[in-house]
Image: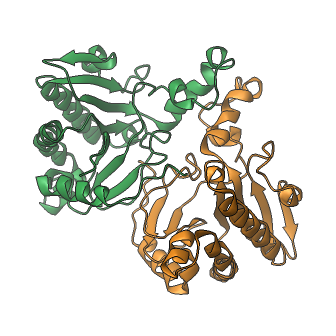
Chain colours: A orange, B green
Amino acid sequence: MRIPNHIGVIPDGNRRWSLARGLSKENGYDKGLDPGVQLFRLCQEIGIKELTYYGFTMDNTKRPSIQTKAFTDACIRAVELLSKEDASLLVVGNTESQMFPKELIPYTERKNIGKGGIKVNFLVNYGWDWDLSRLISDTKNIKNSLKSNILCYLNSYDISRVDLIIRWGGMRRLSGFLPVQSIYSDFYVVDDYWPDFKPEHLFNALMWYDKQDITLGG
Amino acid sequence: MRIPNHIGVIPDGNRRWSLARGLSKENGYDKGLDPGVQLFRLCQEIGIKELTYYGFTMDNTKRPSIQTKAFTDACIRAVELLSKEDASLLVVGNTESQMFPKELIPYTERKNIGKGGIKVNFLVNYGWDWDLSRLISDTKNIKNSLKSNILCYLNSYDISRVDLIIRWGGMRRLSGFLPVQSIYSDFYVVDDYWPDFKPEHLFNALMWYDKQDITLGG
């Protein structure tokens, strides 16, 4: 079976999960923590080399503050949980904004946790335009190098090309997730909400991915 | 019914369509011309404001020359056909490379054709990295302006945000199609190959789009 090197995870549907249970919107984020760890361990066992979670975006922080606080807290907690596993952990996002949780600053340089191993990236207060903006601001370094290797000059330069993106919650859009690394990604949508994560979701996505013909445009 | 302003079209599956008929791969491209005009007229009637066709990419030109010639000729012919309609027509792509067909140079500045109207963009010898590279090379102009408005500084600056992308041929990936304009696009996949285009494909995509909740990350 052909296994992707790098899986991108868009864990959507937390608010709709809450509403469907008669709860207010902000209650769903906590319920995404166990699925996050479960998915990580499955990927580790399967031999996935890199895993990127879409935490929250700069756009998301325009939501009501009760929601913003809830998903920020959930991301802090998620990174703390992952930091007890064996991984090479990195948080990527705009740390210059007040919305970036200071608890996660220590993770903004990649570090080996436990025995190291699978690269795990967590996007926190990330913005697609913030990511691309380094192409502009870092021009002195870029000018004389190969323009074609744009990946190196993103703010997310330490995140590789994504082979498979799995989005929970039924939406068929990328919503700003790593626009450059997603250029050739295969995109699999799970209709269930993220808090209802089941291992079958991942297995189905992997079986589907195995049947795709990867050409990278050639 | 909520109609998208801008539809992106990835007309894939021409080679597989040929092979399925016992023809060699390059024979399918011609069969995509009628569908292209048919789709254009339907969009015009429905009131779509902008339509972007994914012609071919710089990556595609690494294919065997018999294929490259076939899809290049088909794109020239497609633009010629569209230039007999009422539209505001633009071809976007890397004109500095030899692979850009000189017949299409006159279309690389937007021009009103007939009575004008719907904006029609055709990507020819396009590359996602070529598109983004203007962020680097045009820095003198960009430095003092708002970085957040990245769209203005792309090589594809005259193409707006895409609301709905329809891809024929069953693949669920963007393959480098306008990475910045596709950030929030809803993505609809038709399993049929592009030469087998039917109006129902468009109508089904529009009905599906009508049910999507557009948030732009908010």
Q: How many marks?
A: 0
| Residue in view at x 46 percent, y 51 percent | A216
> Where's residue A209, x and y in %?
45, 70
Relative horizontal placement of residue A198, taking residue B75 as reference (left or right): right
Q: Determine which quarter of the picture holds residue B207.
A: bottom left
| Residue in view at x 13 percent, y 42 percent | B42
> Where's residue A184, x and y in %?
48, 53
Relative horizontal placement of residue B15, taking residue A131 as reference (left or right): left
Toward the viewer: B218 or B209?
B218
**Quick check: can you spot residue A160?**
yes
Q: Is residue A146 above or below residue B106?
A: below
**Quick check: can you spot residue A47?**
no
| Residue in view at x 55 percent, y 47 percent | A179
Q: Is residue B163 above or below residue B172?
A: above
Relative horizontal placement of residue B217, taking residue B120 as reference (left or right): right
> Where's residue B2, x and y in %?
28, 49
| Residue in view at x 45 percent, y 67 percent | A188
Q: Is residue B57 above or below residue B169?
A: above
Toward the viewer: B81 or A12?
A12
> Where's residue A175, x and y in %?
52, 53
Q: Determine which quarter of the picture holds residue A141.
A: top right
